[in-house]
Image (cartoon, rainbow, N blue to C red):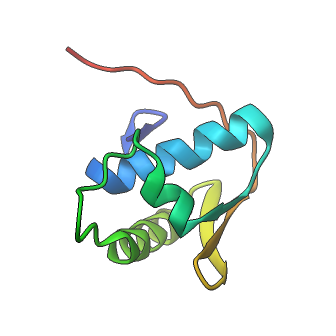
């Protein structure tokens, strides 16, 4: 996943972030559950041991390090909040 041409994160963690930002852009939603993320087929978590919690920790840490205009925060058991501090425009650009 890129922001303004800068690499942020790839793989499953990147797809998690993309899914959350896309939903935020579409509906303004900022709260997401771990269960919802596990069931989202677009994210492509592997069946069985998906390591979602570890992927979310890595993603939260990476976003905090970069100081991007959005962060993830745990707000309860199995609940995340996407904190957005400036305008976000998400678009998918699949490269061949």
Figure quadrant of residue 38: bottom left
In the image: residue 51, left or right of residue 89: left
Q: Which residue in the rendered view is the most extreme toward the right? A: 28
Tally of numbered tags: 0
Q: In this rendering, does residue 11 appear at all?
A: yes
Task: Locate residue 63, reporting x and y percent.
Answer: 49, 64
In the image: residue 13, left or right of residue 33: left
Nearest to the observer: residue 46 or residue 3: 46
Q: Is residue 55 above or below residue 26?
A: below
Q: Residue at x 49, y 34 (%)?
A: 4
Q: Which residue in the rendered view is the most extreme toward the bottom? A: 77
Q: Residue at x 73, y 56 (%)?
A: 30
Q: Is residue 77 above or below residue 47?
A: below
Nearest to the observer: residue 48 or residue 13: 48
Task: Locate residue 21, reporting x and y percent.
Answer: 60, 44
Q: Which residue in the rendered view is the most extreme toward the left? A: 96
Q: Is residue 51 above or below residue 21?
A: below
In the image: residue 76, left or right of residue 56: right
Q: Residue at x 72, y 32 (%)?
A: 26
Q: Residue at x 75, y 55 (%)?
A: 85
Q: In this rendering, does residue 9 appear at all?
A: no
């Amino acid at each position: 996943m890129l922001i303004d041409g800068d690499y942020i994160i790839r793989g499953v963690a990147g797809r998690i972030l993309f899914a959350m930002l896309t939903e935020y852009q579409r509906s303004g939603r900022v709260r997401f559950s771990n269960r919802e993320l596990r069931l989202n087929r677009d994210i492509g978590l592997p069946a069985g041991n998906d390591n979602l919690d570890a992927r979310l920790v890595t993603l939260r840490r990476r976003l905090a390090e970069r100081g991007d205009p959005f962060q993830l925060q745990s707000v309860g058991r199995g609940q995340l909040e996407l904190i957005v501090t400036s305008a976000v425009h998400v678009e998918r650009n699949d490269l061949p």
